[in-house]
Image: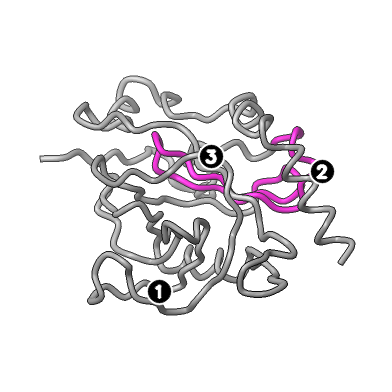
């Protein structure tokens, strides 16, 4: 049997209960960026360093782990069919890795990494990100003129070990993602992110 952890005070906005920081000054020059945390199974959207949206996600299972690193949103579709099983309908799908078919979309969240590499979301969250993120702009079928919104997938999940959030019973801040961690995972990619952002602005 699994466990359910309920905060004693539920009067605040969901952002105060999820692990991402509400502000990251390091991101002040980044117009839009989306983060997915593997260990906490949560995501966060920022605009110029301010958290504007956050929620839960379930990512790739041990056998089919979600790739980590920097990606950009590519194409989107309100409904598409999974490349793993043609009976699976993926709603509000936004692709981030075209060749591997990885994207974020609405699908059931069992509460742990269970997907075939994609990033599952609640329907309301999938709809929000579907409208919020930018698509790529193509020159032709083979070449990208402008990339979409940057997406960073980071961290690792302790497969085969107790679920990370069970630590919250002993330490309520066990899963907190510090501003410094966001800066650390972004720093290797910041130059690329700003370069691609400038290209789009000049279009």
**Frontmost residue, 56 versus 189:** 189
131 falls in the magenta region? no
Q: Nearer the viewer, residue 26 or 55?
A: 26
Report the span colored magenta.
24-51
Q: Where, quadrant-wise, is the N terminus in this rendering?
A: top left
Q: Residues within 10 Å of mark 1 (few under 14, many from 20)?
A: many
Residue corresponding to mark 3: 69
Residue 170: percent from the left, percent from the top? Answer: 32, 20
List the residue tagged with mark 2. 29
**4 relative to 197, above or below:** above
Left or right of 118, for residue 44: right
Residue on which disc 1 sits: 91
Q: Are marks 3 and 2 in contact (CB under 8 Å)?
A: no
Q: Position of residue 8 (x, y in %)?
A: 37, 38
Counting residues from the N terminus, which is met first, the one under dot 2 or under dot 1?
2
* Left or right: 108 as drawn, with respect to 129: left
Mark in the foreground, 3 or 2:
3
Using the numbered discs, state the Cα–Cα distance from disc 2 to disc 1 in whole angstroms.
32 Å
Where residue 20 sits, quadrant-wise, is top right
Q: Secondary structure at mark 2?
A: loop
């Amino acid at each position: 049997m699994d466990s359910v952890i309920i905060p004693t005070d539920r009067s605040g906005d969901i952002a105060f209960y999820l692990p991402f920081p509400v502000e990251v000054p390091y991101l002040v020059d980044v117009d839009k960026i989306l983060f997915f945390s593997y260990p906490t199974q949560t995501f966060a959207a920022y605009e110029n360093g301010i958290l504007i949206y956050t929620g839960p996600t379930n990512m790739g299972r041990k056998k089919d782990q979600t790739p980590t690193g920097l990606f950009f949103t590519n194409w989107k579709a309100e409904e598409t069919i999974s490349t793993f099983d043609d009976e699976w309908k993926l709603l509000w799908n936004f692709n981030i890795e075209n060749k591997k078919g990885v994207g974020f979309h609405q699908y059931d969240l069992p509460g742990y990494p269970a997907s075939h590499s994609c990033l599952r979301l609640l329907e309301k969250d999938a709809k929000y990100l579907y409208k919020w993120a930018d698509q790529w702009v193509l020159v032709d079928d083979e070449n990208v003129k402008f990339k979409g919104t940057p997406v960073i997938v980071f961290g690792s999940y302790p497969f085969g070990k107790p679920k990370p959030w069970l630590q919250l019973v002993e330490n309520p801040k066990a899963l907190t993602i510090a501003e410094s961690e966001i800066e650390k995972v972004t720093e290797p990619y910041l130059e690329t992110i700003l370069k691609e952002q400038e290209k789009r602005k000049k279009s």
